Amino acid sequence: MSLYNVQKLMFQLNRDPAIRKRFDEEFDSLLDDYDLTEEEQIALRDPDIGLLYVMGVNGQILMHYAALRGFEWTAYIEAMREGERKYGAVRTGLYTRAASR
């Protein structure tokens, strides 16, 4: 998994107007610029906020991506909960649980 690249893309979407423009106009081409797994690309395209959360994407970065994709705050929180129900515990990163290691 290339968690770093997923988070880098999300970070740059928040900071770089050129990246944001490409997101709006040529999303697939933009994804090709990052070393992403097929699962990550699908989660970004869908967007599957719950899967991105379970993959380990930092909530501060994910929150902005969810808002960009039209998620209201309560829908964002519920998407993360649904992600754990559907995909299991967070796999890596800040939100992994000590008991699941």
Image (cartoon, rainbow, N blue to C red):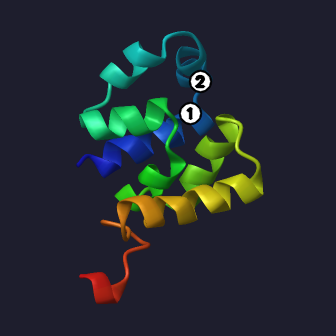
Which quadrant of the structure image shows residue 100?
Answer: bottom left
Whether residue 36 is visible = no
Total marks shown come to 2
Task: Identify the mark nearer the N-term, 1 or 2.
Answer: 1
Category of crowding for the residue at label 1, using alpha-carbon neighbours closer than 10 angstroms: few (below 14), some (14–19), many (at least 20): many
What residue is drawn where x is 49% and y is 11%?
26
Q: Quadrant of the C terminus?
A: bottom left
Residue where numbered disc 2 is placed: 20
User: Residue 3's x, y, as percent?
Assistant: 32, 50
What residue is drawn where x is 35% and y is 32%?
41
Gap in Å between the C-alphas at discs 1 and 2?
A: 5 Å
User: Could you tell me which secondary element the residue under label 2 belongs to?
Assistant: helix
Q: The disc labelled 1 sits on which kind of residue?
A: Leu
User: Residue 84's x, y, as percent?
Assistant: 45, 66
User: Could you tell me which secondary element the residue under label 1 belongs to?
Assistant: helix
Residue where numbered disc 1 is placed: 13
